[in-house]
Image (spheres, rainbow, N blue to C red):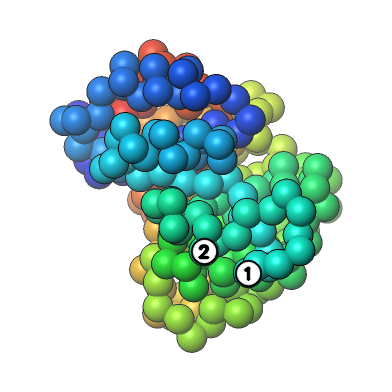
Amino acid sequence: MRFLKKYFVANWKMNKNLSESLDFLIKLNLIDSKQNIWIAPAFCNIVPIKERFPKLMIGAQNVAYKSHGAYTGEVSAEMLCDIGVDFCIVGHSERRGYFHETDEEIGHKLALIVEAEMVPVLCVGETFEQREKGLTHHILDRQLNLALELVKKKSFDLFIAYEPVWAIGSSKPATKEIVENVLKEIQQKVLSIVPRVNLKLLYGGSVTLDNIDEYLSTDCVDGVLVGGASLELKTFQNFIK
Ligand code: PEP
């Protein structure tokens, strides 16, 4: 075992139907795993996966920004909690980009996730252009301030994934130095906004077998959020060895 008790959060995005999901998890065989393996499958596969693997940490990739009502196609935090969802990803750059989610909406979602007693996995990160213009600090500040605005006084488990947009699915991962510096900055900032949280820090963006050890051996990295590489059984098996 290279590292003990790190977090491996798999974001399957819109991939794997039910039989592919179950097949993957059966072959992954997590019974003796010493790591924290968290899986975020498609909404429609959450219940059957939870039934088959009741101890596995299962997450949703999205949640409604309102608690209930006439919002066709949306799924509330309370509904997710009710079916056994343990954690929920919020603020992913694909949701920010393709679905135009604002920092304010992300703040509402995060508050509803906390209220429903699921663990929020908040994604933050700058675009390539923003980094080039020296705006990384400013962007992270804004994303964190608005995402945490409604939960300032609460005490809860909070996961923050630093996911620079330019590193996601790009084969251009951030260097260990960038990750270390940014996560330290995030840690300081978050604890100044929500001092009572139990904070864990993740890195996400083109994590592969070639670079994962570098991240996991970095001081402030509690784990990784993985997209593409979490879909390949052999790769994921090697990650969590
Ligand atoms: C992601 O989408 O959260 C992600 C980290 O993707 P990838 O690992 O494919 O870069």
Q: Which residue lies at the image location 60% right of the left edge and 79% below the top edge?
A: 150
Which of the image's four quarters has the N terminus? top left
Q: Quadrant of residue 167?
A: top right
Tag 2 or tag 1, which sits nearer the N-term? 1
Where residue 66 sits in the image (x, y, percent)? 68, 68
On screen, residue 146 versus residue 34, left or right, reads: right
Q: Residue at x 56, y 69 (%)?
A: 112
Q: Nearer the viewer, residue 6 or 63?
A: 63
The correct choice, above or below, for 23 with respect to 187 in the image is: above
Q: Amino acid at mark 2?
A: Glu
Where does residue 57 sit, x and y in percent of width and height?
Answer: 35, 45
83 left or right of 189 in image: left
Give the left or right position of residue 76, taking residue 180 as reference. right
Q: Quick one: which residue is furthest to the left in this view? A: 32
Pointers 1 and 2 in contact (C-beta within 8 Å): yes
Which SS class for mark 2? helix
Q: Which residue is mark 2?
A: 78
The residues bearing labels 1 and 2 have C-alpha atoms spaced at a distance of 7 Å
Q: Eyeballing the image, is 176 above or below 211?
A: below
User: 231 or 223: nearer the eye?
Assistant: 231
Residue 67: image tag: 1
Residue at position x 40%, y 23% in the image? 22
Q: Quadrant of the C terminus?
A: top left
Number of marks in picture:
2
x and y percent of residue 188 in the render? 49, 71
Residue 160 visible within the image:
no
Mark 1 residue crowding within 10 angstroms, few (<14) / some (14–19) / many (20+): some
From the viewer's perspective, is 191 left or right of 30?
Answer: right
